Image: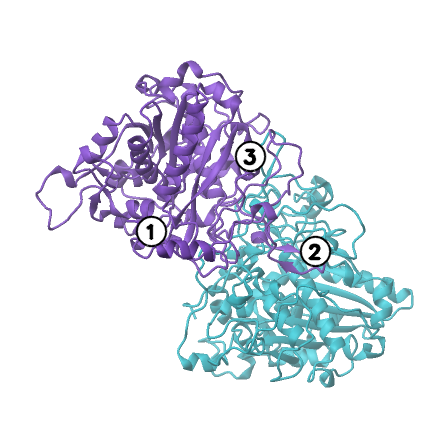
Chain colours: A purple, B cyan
Amino acid sequence: MSSIIISAETNQHLIAVGNQDPSAATEHLPTDLPGNDIHSSRSTSRSGINFPSAIANLLHLHHSSPPPLPAVNELTPTFTPKDDISSLRSFIHGPGDWSSLLDPLHPSLRREILKYGEFSQATYDAFDNNPGSEYRGSSLYGRRRILQLLGLSRYGYAVSRYIYATSNINLPRWLVQPLLRPKSSWCDVSNWMGFVAVSGDAESRRIGCRDIAVAWRGTVSAAEWVEDLQAQLVPLIPCAPDHEGARVERGFLSLYTSRSESSRFTRSSASEQVMRELRRLVEFYKNRGEDVSVTITGHSLGGALALLNAAEAASILPADVAVTVISFGAPRVGNELFGEMLKAKKVKVLRVATKQDLVPKVPGVVFNEDRMGEGWEWVYTHVGDELALDTEASMYLKRGVVDVAGFHGLETYLHLVDGHEKAGGVFRARARRDVALVNKFAGLLREELAIPERWYQPANKGMVRNEFGRWVVPRRPKEDIPSPCAPSPAAAAASASSAPRI
Amino acid sequence: MSSIIISAETNQHLIAVGNQDPSAATEHLPTDLPGNDIHSSRSTSRSGINFPSAIANLLHLHHSSPPPLPAVNELTPTFTPKDDISSLRSFIHGPGDWSSLLDPLHPSLRREILKYGEFSQATYDAFDNNPGSEYRGSSLYGRRRILQLLGLSRYGYAVSRYIYATSNINLPRWLVQPLLRPKSSWCDVSNWMGFVAVSGDAESRRIGCRDIAVAWRGTVSAAEWVEDLQAQLVPLIPCAPDHEGARVERGFLSLYTSRSESSRFTRSSASEQVMRELRRLVEFYKNRGEDVSVTITGHSLGGALALLNAAEAASILPADVAVTVISFGAPRVGNELFGEMLKAKKVKVLRVATKQDLVPKVPGVVFNEDRMGEGWEWVYTHVGDELALDTEASMYLKRGVVDVAGFHGLETYLHLVDGHEKAGGVFRARARRDVALVNKFAGLLREELAIPERWYQPANKGMVRNEFGRWVVPRRPKEDIPSPCAPSPAAAAASASSAPRI
């Protein structure tokens, strides 16, 4: 696998042109926003290569002639009116069994999957990874603006808190690599890892409960990422006394639970931050007599973190709060006992996995010399229900190329979800999602569509001309400047005197 | 040399954010304009590598600690008021000897060099090389708008004609490669190669003559470009009967003189187009009793074409029209007799060449088995006066890296010209040109300046969202749509009946 390059998607997640969110207030938004460093491919060559047929079979690729290309319909709205799905609540956001909604895929469930997928995509789009940025590692936008600026106001959620994780030196190399960056004046050790959001009243009525969504950012950085997943499985955080033997991948767990004293953002771990917020919100809404659900989502590594978060949430929150995971392209996270623990705690998991995507296929078995032969406890397994997608179902995508990065991309997933009707079925004729989005960070669309590859980037990497005609890196608007990273002297003194928390 | 990558600058020439040209009329210009495909580097790694000291000496690189970095002055205007230089006319735009103005470099000559350098840069910035573009290979902007949209109105010129060259299959591979593109609906065989512009009345008064500027586009595409310059020298176009034995590089000559019947743009060659326009303009202004000069400029390959153009112009135009060449990073073009021919015709040539740039060092000697030992007529030589620049003179640039592409870049040249005072001197303290421009297509600026590398790119590769929220490739404004490429039926019938022109 070391010969397959997986693209540095983290480095390419950039902000959309901001003011076309139809549901946004008529506030003037800049038509182009400071963005990330793009790191996009400079070559016009296709990133795919032709593999021998053995591999093609492994990835379910077949050299068939492409079906006729429907016109990309530029003149239709990109989303359909929302339906009241409160009657389906228990199946989607509740403990009810949703397997009957999966094949064929119920349209309402499809829309919910796309909603959480867009939240996952938002964690990429708003991540500031511009090497020149003063606030590299933070979200580009303040939490009050992020959904609107990304055109996601229409979902009717409000972000209540941001989550940060530390780029702790104890993390495995493959996690640290993408997180490492030159010293920024903002924060050396903390990275923005996602957000917690709550459904507003209208959306809560529509879906039948107050939904607390947690979106975790992934990272699609390098082949090492996937190779190093052969790391040692470690015991889960000790909140599963009945599930002795449940184990999860060490790197994911480190990212979820590490702290760093030198940053106020990660003096508590991502786990502590998100659980504190979930407990707070759950208590608040339950006190108002509302039904509350928690839906955790993420792509790639973010999908792995979502599962860890779900395990913890289901252990700590009241039993009547349904905990659901919707992940995209997530790797296996833990062993069979871990999966059984989640099932026992009634965590519903929907893993969206494209057949041609390698990441959900790894890791396989842990090769650990000390432990060899000790049994299944060392084998990674998947959890929950799978929604299997197939790139060959879409006539919009190129044929006969193996583009591992493209197949793993979240935008590709969202395209395939939009077109998915049933297993082995053809792409939905009435699919409305903008096909051009597939090529934001990839080169997967057929050439005839004339959509540029890897097109999602800010003008001039965010540089603008000032009044003297000089190109400068602009300052962020006040509402998008993150808090200072260094802990206040008073807080530092206080924490120095208390016992270290393990 | 095949181990050195020279960047595909042609693929990166994009349009500036348009509405900050202080001298433009207060017409509303879009703040972001449809642009080229960017093909910019996706890696954050520096493009330079550390070479052994022998090579370092060859390129005049020395590992000295960088001098202190002056503040990049964001709060000063980027250009200085223009001075009346009509008294210097004969030295700059006329036949007078300008060697006394070169070292130290006279400020007025410096400004003129920068002016023509910006015209050369314009041929890159306005070239549509977007694979998805309907008009790939043309100028992004109509000739009436191009200078204004690129912020060059302040120079007081008007573009009178565009020049096109054909991507004839008889061209050497290294020329064809950058010109080849997938079938576009506009024109398969013609490429926009530059423009002819005339100084307006104010500028003509300032410099002391009516100046006709010709700017040729270069191409900085691949190592083959440089390697293949070992091609056979061929006789110059037969307008030099007194200079039998003058020879020029075959590829350059092909590009300058090739025609293609299948395109109305290149039914006449670039040579024929530019000479027709020069004759027309010269006649027009001489009939008004004005002094006329012709100043031809270009970078890299464009500098080579400028020299061929000058040879032809000096042969054809009236003797009292001074012909001057100002080139940047140009390779050698012809043999010694070619150089003597230009001198005899009183063509003044200023070659701006950076010591660390490899392109002016090639080709050397032609290795041609048939001709070996026949003498100096097969050796390429440079022509005219050289203005030698040194990257080490600028404290803004990185030390200790060998970035061949960056050293060859035109923006680097313009930066160094701006800071140049005298041979071996330090960077001018009062240099005003925006330093950030160096990194438009390169990664040469010191990290401390926090200017992103290769930042010059349009938002979302020119994609925009339509009223339905869909991302689409926009249509060009009417005034920027080039004429249809196919010859009209009447013209095709007429040319079919006349004798082919050789």
Task: Return the chain for callout 3.
Answer: A
Q: Which residue is mark 3?
A: A151
| The C terminus of chain B, quarter of image | bottom right
Pick the front one: A292 or B169 = A292
Task: Return the chain for callout 2.
Answer: B
Pick the front one: B235 or B271 = B271
**Is A31 drawn above or below residue B271 in the view shown?**
above
In the image, farthest residue toward the top: A87
Q: Position of residue A171 (x, y in %)?
A: 30, 53
| The N terminus of chain B, quarter of image | bottom left
The amino acid type, in three-letter code, at marker 2 is Leu
Pick the front one: A58 or B263 = A58
Task: Return the chain for callout 1.
Answer: A
Q: Earlier in the sequence, mark 1 or mark 3?
A: 3
Proximity of marks 1 and 2: CB atoms separated by less than 8 Å: no
**Is A319 drawn above or below residue B476 in the view shown?**
above
Can residue B172 be seen from the camera position used here? no
* Other residues around mark 1 within 10 Å, as few (<14) / some (14–19) / many (≥20): many
Q: Which residue is mark 1?
A: A175
The amino acid type, in three-letter code, at marker 3 is Gly
Q: Position of residue A361 (x, y in %)?
A: 26, 39
In the rendered structure, the answer to whether residue A333 lies left or right of residue B44 reads: left
Q: Quadrant of residue B329?
A: bottom right
The amino acid type, in three-letter code, at marker 1 is Leu
Q: Which residue is mark 2?
A: B150
The answer for how far apart the CA atoms under marks 1 and 3 are is: 30 Å
* Other residues around mark 3 within 10 Å, as few (<14) / some (14–19) / many (≥20): many
In the image, farthest residue toward the left: A373
The answer for how far apart the CA atoms under marks 3 and 2 are is: 31 Å
In the rendered structure, the answer to whether residue B470 lies left or right of residue B74 reads: left
Discs 1 and 2 carry the same chain letter: no
Q: Residue at the location (80% across, 61% down)? A: B156
